[in-house]
Amino acid sequence: MRSIRLVPELRAVHLTRYRETTPALLLYFTENYDLAGEDVPPEIRKVALRDLPGLFWRSECTFLEAPEPLWMRFLPRGAAIVALFKATGLLRGRRRRVGTYAMENNDLPTLIGGRRSVPALAVRLFSTALGLYMRLMIDRIVFASEGSRAVYTSIPGVGAIESTTIEELPTAVESDDADVLALSACFVGVLETRKGILALMEAWERVEQQLPTAHLDVVGPGEHADAVREWVDRAPATRRLLGQLPRHEVLSLLARTQVLAAPSLPDGRWREQIGLPIKEALSNGLTVVTTHQTGLAGWLRGHGHRVVELEGEGSLAGRLSGALIDALTGPLERPLVRASLPAVEGRYASDSWLHRERVATSAPASVADPSPPAAVSPPNAARG
């Protein structure tokens, strides 16, 4: 293997990708809750920061896939890791390159200050420093959405880095759709305010008033689990809390459900980048109801899914319930949803581009590459 792939937090989806993507030494620091019930292969290595100097020194690998620079809480550690990888290569006389997969689609002032206002001068200074670091240390970038590209290319110097945009869309999962339940919806994710569970609970009560036989499954753990359980117990005929499930059970549930509700909300520096439940729902042909926070909002809206704005007439619960009712009573045809997806999953197409041997010597690939991957979005794709 010529590559190292560094994942700060290992998730169940990384285990699937590990078998399908470019062979690489996969390193991680911590585990995500969704690894429950999953077997982690021994060749996927948990490391500490102190392990990396010796590992990089001994390694023959010449390419590092690093976490994206705008992952703010990881940025100092990530920058140190990238510098260490390049420095050990330089001392050994090996030219090493670094690439990153960029998903962040929040604006820079919010990423810097969270809920606090940040002076324009501070934003410019941070942007200039970050641009200098990226120009010196990052050799290629894949943007997961047009929103991500817009944020990163607003940073000085980043536009000169070799890059391309490949929207992170899944491929279709074969299904006969015979077991899909009418008027069924589900929520999959951590039970936190930022994922929209409280907003969904309020909206669902309005859905039940117009669609008394509609049914909602809630999947996931989190700080609002007790509140959700109490809410479910008040109407068990139309609500069900399943708690944390292994990934294969989540996928089985999606195969039987009409609509995914994913009403994520901004929370400080956090904004939904893509949303794994959204990808898994699309694979199975579900109609997605979400907010404009996800980087896929433009694509979803353009393909008939329901995208709710956070600001507008009436309450968010009212707009969300209207979108849910619309999706439940008129869901997209599942075969058409699956047909709208690319032949190669966006994440895998991005991996192939990022880890390929050829290195551009002049213009960025987004401008000069004559044969981009099949999943690359058109130049004028709507920003998510």
Image (cartoon, helix red, strand yellow):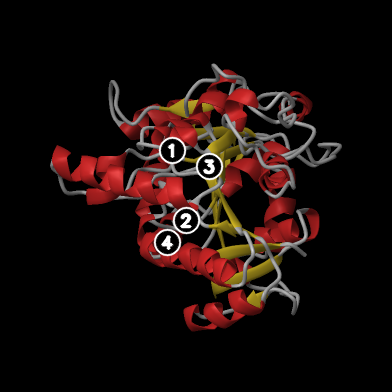
Residue under label 3, please give it: 274
Q: Amino acid at mark 2?
A: Val
Residue in view at x 59 percent, y 28 percent: 366
Q: How many marks?
A: 4
Q: Amino acid at mark 3?
A: Ile
Residue 376 placement, left or right of 69: right
* Residue 336 image point, x, y percent: 75, 23
Q: Which mark is residue 158?
A: 1
Residue under label 2, please give it: 232
Q: Which residue lies most toward the top here?
A: 380
> Which-is-in-front pick, marks 4 and 2?
4
Number of residues whose C-alpha sits closer than 10 Å to that of mark 4, classed few (under 14), some (14–19) or many (20 or more): some
- Image quarter for residue 332? top right
* Residue 365 image point, x, y percent: 62, 31
- Image quarter for residue 97? bottom right
Residue under label 4, please give it: 79
Element under label 4?
A: helix
